[in-house]
Amino acid sequence: MFTKLAATLRYFKDAVPFRLVPALITTAVLLTLLLIPAPEGLAPKAWTLVAIFITTIVAIILKVMPIGVMAMMAIVIVSLAQVTSNTSKGAIADALSSFSNPLIWLIVVAILISKGLKKTGLGNRIGLMFIAMLGKRTVGIGYGLTICELVLAPFTPSNTARGGGIVHPIMKSIATAFDSDPAKGTQGKVGTYLALVNYHANPITSAMFLTATAPNPLVVDYVARATNQNFHLTWTTWALCMLLPGLICLLVMPLIIYLLSPPELKATPNAVSYAKEEMAKMGPLSFKEKVMLGTFGLMLVLWANVPAMLLGPSFTLDPTVVAFIGLFVLIITGTIDWDDVLSEKSAWDTLVWFGALVMLAEQLNKLGVIAWFSAGMKAAIVASGMGWLPVAAVLVLAFVFSHYMFASTTAHISAMLFAFLTVGTQLIPAEYIVPFMLMMTAGSGIMMTLTHYATGTSPIIFGSGYVTMGAWWRVGFVMCVIELLIFAVVGTTWWKLLGYW
């Protein structure tokens, strides 16, 4: 009997397109959560959505099936459970609502545009230039990518456009030049390390400048409102306060990632001469490379909002509009063709899974889960009788690590930041309010380090296949903790020297 049962299980395991044990664990998680009564203050449908969200994350972590399939599972369950609407028509409309989100299409189009860098050879040329300048060691290339991020950050209000649309294609080209390719199973040579550096430079620079990512102006508004207009973060104030701790984070980040995820190819003594020889073979820029370069220049100018600065706010363009302009230019000039667009599987895969996660995060907010969580935290803090310093630490940590529940920085900040800042002003002495506000401001960028769906940049870089999910989450958690410590120690000291408290 046991032999037949074992044979049946083996057959079933081979026949089904999912991993059986992780699937059973995930199912058990869902059923257990559904059997637990809804906590006080939370509607049953909201608790059901929490169960669906947690189950989806568990399924993704355990790799039950490809992430796109798990995302589709979430869409199906939300539609069938009708937790967001009383009709299946309304439920499926809610489940698919995020696919009209401009941020998601910005990610997709950025991936499609990066196809042009590879096809024209411009990406390879740029990669060879970096190798020629800094290529004696892999860590040197990592610092080159970090510097590139830092230079672009003040002028690129979309961190997705910057990290995913500009720097990431360069990173991929450099990795390819060293024959580090996920398709060949050689991503560990240099690609995994460079992809992690490429990504982790992005949240740090996003925290350093008011104009480095879209939700930062919202942070400014919330800080001013929470302090009754007593503390305003101007562009200069923000940059000055974040300068020293941010630069230290950028300085140590490539080294820490080098320890956490060391590249197989550490020293590249012949890389500089190799790069120069290869650039000589490529000759001068081709017409399509010039078009690609010009398109990037156009997008950078528009992403930096230069027309609006010169001609007025009516010339402001949404970052997604700019991305579509760039893609259209590449298509009509023949730099890439429609078949290239259709064949870019990673873009369409990202559209499905990231869209589903954004939908879940948005619906959690709409059903009051986030507000319930914030109110519960305030009550618990007050009841605990903690001193102001532990209270400040708990608020910062809870806000940052609750980003595991969000697939959008803007959504997280919109849903929770003002509530946390308000609680802080009520429980922290007035003389320490400003450093608390600045720590929360820094945390709104640092929290993007955590997951592969944390912000628009992450699915682009994760989708390129250089980093496993386990490595991404492990490195993300460590970097988040280290960066928070740097801001807590160096940042508060720096702000004290500047006279802000």
Image (cartoon, helix red, strand yellow):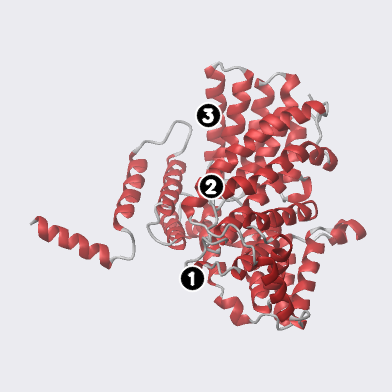
Mark 3 is surrounded, within 10 Å at the Cα level, by few (under 14), some (14 to 19) or many (20 or more) other residues, namely: few
Marks 2 and 3 close (CB-CB < 8 Å): no
Residue at which label 1 appears: 184
Residue 419, quarter of picture: top right
Residue at left 72%, top 72%?
A: 276
Specify the farthest residue to the left. Answer: 1
Identify the disc placed on residue 376.
Answer: 3
Amino acid type for the residue under numbered disc 3: Gly
Q: Amino acid at mark 2?
A: Leu
Q: In which image quadrant can residue 128 be found? A: bottom right
> What is the secondary structure assignment of the residue under circle 1?
helix
- Residue 245, compared with residue 157, is above or below; it is above
Q: CA distance from mark 1 to mark 3?
A: 49 Å
Give the residue drawn at x 53%, y 56%: 94
Of the numbered discs in the image, which one, if any, rests on residue 120?
Answer: none
Q: Which residue lies under the disc numbered 2?
A: 260
Residue situated in front as seen by the camera: 236 or 104? 236
Earlier in the chain: of badge 1 and badge 3, it is 1
Marks 1,2: beta carbons within 8 A: no
Q: Are marks 1 and 3 in contact (CB under 8 Å)?
A: no
Task: Please provide percent x and percent y for residue 372.
Answer: 53, 34
* Lower position in the chain sequence, tag 1 or tag 2: 1
Residue 240 lies, with reference to residue 139, above or below; the image says: above
Q: Is residue 414 visible?
A: no
User: Residue 474, percent across and down?
Assistant: 50, 46
Q: What's the residue type where badge 1 is placed?
A: Lys
**Front label number (1 vs 3):** 1
In whole angstroms, how far apart are the C-alphas of marks 1 and 2? Answer: 23 Å
Compared with 393, 293 (above or below) is below
Q: In the drawing, does residue 365 fall left or right of residue 328?
A: left
Q: Quadrant of the C terminus?
A: top right
